[in-house]
Image (tube, rainbow, N blue to C red):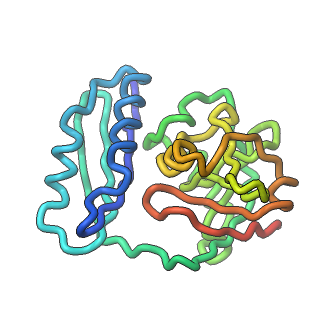
């Protein structure tokens, strides 16, 4: 029995609508197909219902389960200032690159919650996870990007054991990012960015324990 749901977390902006909506819906459909869920044909309509009459930026969370049920919740969202820098830390918790569910965004989040719980909220804005080989994978809520001086950001491949993030997909499609394995030594040699579709790209400082 499947005891988890698919999730999409979107940002809605007045005058712009849903940010990266097409990519979110495409990922949801692709994930549903991969897991044998029905197709989420009502997702776009449910999202539109959730923002009817909205006046300010919103964080929208859509869940979709194996029975085809869609739930949408919304909350006010305060975008980050453009010059924001986050403190990132490393988790002792490791990801298993053979776990193919890591490539799909679901409510099965125990490994990410364990990593986040290694630090107090004031010690880290984000916690970065490695896989069993020590390769850099992702944050608990973000994809990882490295400015290595080539002019194109480098982001770890899905095969390392990580989510196909929507912001990550957009940057790759725009040729602003390319796929390449990252070791911890690489992070020390370049400029670290982390990000997701809700918050965008965020500069980060990696603080070693």
**Residue at image location 43% in from the left, 60% down from the top:** 198
Q: Is residue 72 left or right of residue 119?
A: left
Tally of numbered discs: 0
Work out whether 97 lies above or below 131. Answer: above
The vertical placement of 13 against 96, above or below, is below
**Residue 44 falls left or right of residue 35:** left
Quadrant occupied by the C terminus: bottom right
Q: Is residue 67 above or below residue 56?
A: above
Position of 57 with respect to 182 (left or right) is left
The quadrant the N terminus occupies is top left
Does residue 166 appear anywhere in the picture? yes
Residue at figure coordinates x 67%, y 40% from the top left: 179
Residue 109 visible at all = no
**Front-lying residue, 173 or 60:** 173
On the image, the x and y values in percent for residue 89 come to: 72, 64
- Left or right for 68, reference 87: left
Tell me which residue sits at (57%, 44%) in the image.
172
Quadrant of the rendered image containing residue 44: top left
Front position in the image: 168 or 99: 168
Write the residue at 82% across / 47% down: 183
From the top left corner, tell me how far across and down residue 165 is, in percent.
52, 46
Where 2 sits versus 124, above or below?
above
Percent coordinates x, y for residue 202 in the rendering: 58, 67
Task: Determine the image quadrant of residue 119.
Answer: bottom right
Residue at the extreme top of the image, as rendered:
36
- Report x, y in % for residue 72: 24, 51
């Amino acid at each position: 029995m499947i005891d988890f749901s698919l999730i999409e977390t979107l940002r809605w902006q007045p005058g712009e609508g849903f940010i990266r909506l097409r990519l979110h819906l495409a990922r949801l459909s692709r994930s549903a197909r991969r897991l044998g869920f029905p197709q989420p044909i009502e997702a776009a309509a449910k999202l539109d219902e959730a923002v009817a009459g909205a006046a300010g930026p919103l964080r929208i969370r859509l869940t979709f389960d194996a029975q085809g049920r869609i739930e949408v919740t919304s909350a006010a969202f305060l975008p980050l200032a453009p010059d924001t820098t986050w403190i990132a830390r490393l988790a002792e918790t490791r990801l298993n690159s053979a776990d193919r569910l890591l490539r799909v965004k679901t409510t099965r989040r125990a490994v990410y919650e364990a990593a986040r719980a290694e630090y107090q909220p004031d010690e880290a804005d984000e916690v970065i996870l490695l896989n069993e080989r020590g390769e850099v994978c992702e944050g608990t809520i973000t994809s990882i990007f490295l400015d290595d001086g080539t002019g194109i950001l480098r982001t770890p491949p899905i095969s390392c054991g990580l989510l196909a993030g929507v912001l990550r997909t957009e940057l790759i499609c725009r040729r602003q990012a390319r796929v390449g394995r990252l070791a911890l030594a690489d992070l020390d040699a370049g400029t670290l960015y982390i990000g997701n579709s809700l918050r965008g790209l965020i500069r980060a400082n990696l603080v070693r324990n």
